[in-house]
Amino acid sequence: MVMPQPTERLRFREMHESDLENMAALLGDPEVMRYYPSPKTRQDAEGWIAWNRSNYAQHGFGLWIIETRTGDFVGDCGLTWQEVNGVLGLEVGYHVRSDLQGQGYATEAAAACRDFAGQQTDAGVLVAIIHPKNRASERVAEKIGMHRVADDHSGAIPARSVLSMSL
């Protein structure tokens, strides 16, 4: 499988069932999931992994595990097709362990995924769907070249900010 190139500090790899402990801790962390309806359960994390495995098979990409060059788990980051105001859009998404937030890992990983999307997909546009109060995540999207373009009203959260950029 083709995936984003390693960055200065991070590398990418496919998500596997063996990642359940790390993913359950990440997606179950109330700080990481602050802007989601609720933290995810262990069973939800199993579903998350299965969903990404399905995305790899169907699209050739999904959310990948991001880890340091020495193999320490950082979080996940990648590309998924998401509905935005009734239209499918290629989204860059990211989650970083709460104890590692604020160190630039999300920006570094998201930039690598942006570059991958431009080189390996024909999407033409990349979006990020972000809770309107999640300013830190919005800053990540802005740092990789995205700009706020709309509000999305189709998700579980009543209104989400949509940032976008041409690839």
Image (cartoon, helix red, strand yellow):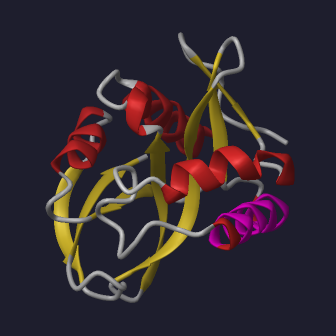
Using the image, determine if residue 39 lies above or below residue 145: below
Residue plotted at (66% across, 65% down): 42
Q: Nearer the viewer, residue 9 or 34?
A: 34
Q: Note whether residue 120 is visible.
A: no
How many discs mark residues in the rendered view?
0
- Residue 20, horizontal then vertical, whole percent: 75, 53
Q: Position of residue 10 (x, y in %)?
A: 59, 20
User: Does the magenta portion include 163?
Assistant: no
Q: Is residue 164 left or right of residue 44?
A: left
Q: Residue at x 53, y 59 (%)?
A: 123
> Residue at coordinates 78% horizontally, 67% vertically from top-left?
50
Q: Position of residue 154 (x, y in %)?
A: 33, 88
- Which secondary structure type mostly characterizes the magenta part of the structure? helix
Magenta residues span: 44-58
Residue 52 spot, x, y in % from top left: 72, 61
For image coordinates 84% across by 54% down, the residue present is 17
